[in-house]
Structures are given as structure tokens and as C-alpha cells.
Image (spheres, coloured by chain):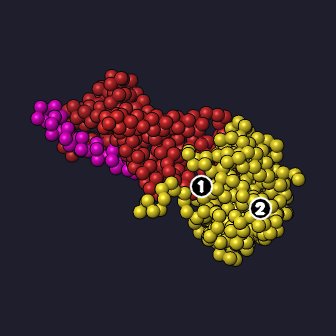
Chain colours: A yellow, B red
Amino acid sequence: MNNLVEIKDLSFSYGKRIIYENVSLEIPKGKITAFMGPSGTGKTTMLRLIGGQLVPDSGSVMFDGINVHKLSRPDLYSLRRRMSMLFQSGALFTDLNVFDNVAYPIREHTKLPEEVIRDMVLMKLEAVGLRGAAGLMPHELSGGMARRATLARSIALDPELIMYDEPFTGQDPITMAVLLRLIKTLNRTLGLTSVVVTHDVSEILTIADYAYILAGTKVVAGGTPEELKKSDDPRVRQFIKGEYDGPVPFNYPTEVSYLKDL
Amino acid sequence: MFILNLILKLGGWGQRRLSAIGRATIMLFYSLVGRPQFRKNFPQLIRQIYVVGVQSISIIVVSGLFIGMVLGLQGFHVLVDFMAEGALGQMVALAIIRELGPVVTALLFAGRAGSALTAEIGLKKATEQLLSMEMMAVDPLRRVIAPRFWAGVISLPLLTVIFTLVGIFGGKLVGVDWLGVDDGIFWSGMQSSIDFWDDLMMCAVKSVVFAITVIWIALFNGYDLVPTSVGISKATTNTVVQSSLAVLGLDFVLTAVMF
């Protein structure tokens, strides 16, 4: 299979806390890949490792055959033009309105005349259904609208890879359905490669082509949604079905036993 | 054991300070060194000069006026006992140009603009705006930090000039117009005692040094803070405290070195 991102034997830790140990995974080109897993397993960290914002302790991240962490600062910045990331909080620039937010990356990286930029921005905004909200400021938007505005900004320069960090958190069912459909249609029509980090398992499995379950420093399982649903690995079953009891621990690890602590 | 712990703590504190200074230097280096991008940064610079400079004018003018007036009033009552009220102009001008002008302007600037910058940058960090800029292949150091730095370095010396002029006018208002010191003696005493190099240049050097110090501390505290509400409030306090202390300390050092 043709992979856009290949991660090999990656280890990463925050100080003494180990986040990943020898993780290897691939993100196929043109598909939607989901990263699922309990909160706090460092799914966002994985995205920031791919984007080169964090440096792994060992192992490599290859983006289209280029080792992300071996690049100089200017080269890394030019590589980042080929990817984009949707942050959990939306991260719209609060001092610019929706139109200028979407125009921002275009103005930064091209010398196009304003009329062309205007048309491009309106097309992107229409794609996410927010053409009418172009003049609003970020604080006037609802949570779902802010996500969609950020989405428009992320696709402004037609990246090859788009990474969604928890796009569904705190969204009502309708917005969630809208976002799901948007991710799918954008992926198909723009020929993108998408990575979605989420723990909304049932929703994401309806659109994902491939999914990984990350838990406790490892990739627990990976496969197509059908393969995962059929899997008899107890950790996969617990996560897919959302059972509270199982091999994946709920408690934060501690060295002192409960009895002794009391 | 107690001594050992004390030394350990002191060492740890020193290490944290040193690493903060290192990070601050790296931040400033990456913001300022590199190919200038006038087309993109110039509008930002103008906007920031408006925010940190123009919007600080009112507080600078009011403070300058009152400080000049108080100096005139206090000075007059001391000098009049020695029949030396003719030296009032000289006294007010020297005090303001050499010390009060650059120092008080820098302190007010730290409170008015420095804390606001720290909070703004901190909030941009907390809401992932800086991270998302990085992912858009836009360097936040070059686009967010650099224009604010230059805006501060340009604005503070200009504000110092305004403060100084208004302060001297305040002294004249009280001394000449209210208490009746002779107009000609007031101004000619001032003119003959102010030296271009010793006084005006000293004022200029001080205000540029203070500008770099205050704005650097403010930007670094914002850029380096822990992105939570507690972190932001702590960083804004740190900006005001650290830059005030730095300004007062540097003022002594500069005066000692240059005189």
C-alpha cells in the first residue's frame, strides 16, 4: 500500500513519563485513518510528533519519504505547508474575523491578489457551510461553527495531510453528523489524507478506512473497522464496546497499594 | 542536613533562573535574526505601536504633568528659603531628564503595556493559537513576538520624550504661572545647565535600555508561561515585578557607569 506517513520504532517520553515505546504505524495515502484510545494515552502527542512540534527520543517519522525530525528549521516550516492540523480548541485567531482567519495562511504563503484570495476564501467557507458567517468574529461563533471555520482555514492551502485533534468533543449530535460528513467529503473531493484522533468510536468507525487503537504506550490493534469489530482481543473489545471493566486500566497507576494508602 | 537542603534549593533555583535566561535569549534570537519580512511585518508593527505606544500616551501625559507640578511645588518651597528660586527650572529639568523621565515612563510602561502583552501572548498560547500558527508553517516568533518587540523599543523612548516635555511644562506651570518665579530666569537657568551629552544622551540611552528590558521580560513571560489561568495571572504579575526591579537596578548601574 502507498503510505503518506510511516512511523518506525518511535519512543517518546515527557520527562520520566513514557508516552510511547517502539510504536510503528502507517498512514495510507488518500484514506481516513483513525487514532482511538482512552484519554491521556498521548494521541494528540502523536499528531504533534508527526507535525515536528515534538522530537521523539528514538525512532523516525517519515512524511512522504522525508524524515520530519532530521530537517532544518526552514525546511521543517516548508514541509508543514503540506500538512495541516485542526486543534481541539479550534485555535482561531481571536483578533481576526472568520474571513481573515481563513485568508491568513493564503496571505502568508502566497502573493495572490486580494480578489483571488477573496474568491478562494469564499469557496472554502462555502464548503463548510459558513459563507454567511464570513464577517463574524470567533467569539460570536458556536462551538460547532468554530470547528468548521477552523476546518476551512486548514484546507485553505489544499494540504496533503490533515490531522483532526478530537473534532467531535463537546458537539451536539447534529454538528457531529455534519462534521463526520464534512471530513468524509473533503477527504474524497480534495484527495486528502486524513488522520482523526478521537474516542467517539462508533461514529468514527462509520467513515474511517483504517483505525489504530493506542493504549498504554503501545499500538494495541490496527485494522479496518470490520477487522476491529470482529477482533477477539479483549482490550480491543473493551474499547470498541465501551465496557468499564477489562484489561485496560481505568485507575491512574500508583505504586502504593490502596490498603496501605488508607 | 538543613544546610545541605538549603544549598540544594539554592542550586535548583539558580539552575531554573539560568535556564530561563537561556530560553529567553533563544526566543529573542530566533525572533530577530533572519531575513526581514517587511511586507508581512510592517502592518503588524504599526498596529502594535498603536497598541503599546499610542494607547499609553494618556497615562504618560497625566503622570508627567503631575510629577512635574509636584517637583515645581516642592522645589520652590525648598529653594525660596535660600532666595534661590531662580534655580527651579534647572532643578526640575535635571531631575526629570536624568532620572524621573526614563525611569517613571519605563515603570508605567511595564504596568500598562508590558502586563497586557504578557496576558495577550499567554492567552494565544493557552488557546493553541501559537501552535496552530506553527502548524500553518508561520513562525510565531517572527510574526507575533518580533513586531511587538520592535513596537516596544520604538514606543518607550518616544513616550519618555513626551513625559519629559510634559513634566517640564508642569514644573513651569506651578513655578512660573502660579508661584511667580521669573519666566526668563526659569528657562535660561534650564538652558545653561542642561548638557547635550551628559543629560539628553543619558536620558536616551537609559530609555532604550529600559525599553529592551521591559519588552523582553514581558514577551518572554507570555511566551514561556504555563498555559492555564493561574499561569497567566502569575506571568502578568512576574512581568510587572521583574521589569520594575530590573529598571530600577539598571538605572543605578547606568548612572554609575555613565557619570
Residue A214 seen anywhere in this rendered image of the structure: yes
Three-letter amino acid code of the residue under disc 1 = Glu
Q: Is residue B77 magenta?
A: yes
Q: Are marks 1 and 2 in contact (CB under 8 Å)?
A: no
Question: Do the residues at discs 1 and 2 belong to one chain?
Answer: no
- State the predominant SS element of the stretch in magenta: helix
Question: Could you say which quadrant of the image residue B145 lies in?
Answer: top right
Q: Residue at left 39%, top 23%?
A: B197
Residue A181, percent across and down?
77, 70
Residue A83 in the figure: left or right of residue B219: right
Q: Residue at left 70%, top 77%?
A: A174
Q: From what the image shows, is residue A132 above or below residue A118?
A: below
Q: Quadrant of the C terminus of chain A?
A: bottom left
Residue B247 seen anywhere in this rendered image of the structure: no
Local SS, label 1: loop
Q: Tell which subunit mark 2 falls on.
A: A
Q: Residue furthest right?
A: A1
Residue A149, percent across and down?
68, 64
Residue B157, percent across and down?
44, 37
Q: Is residue A232 magenta?
A: no
**Which residue position holds label 1?**
B128
- Numbered badge on residue A211: 2
Foreground residue among B223 and B38: B223
Residue B110, percent across and down?
41, 45
In the image, which residues are magenta? Answer: B56-85
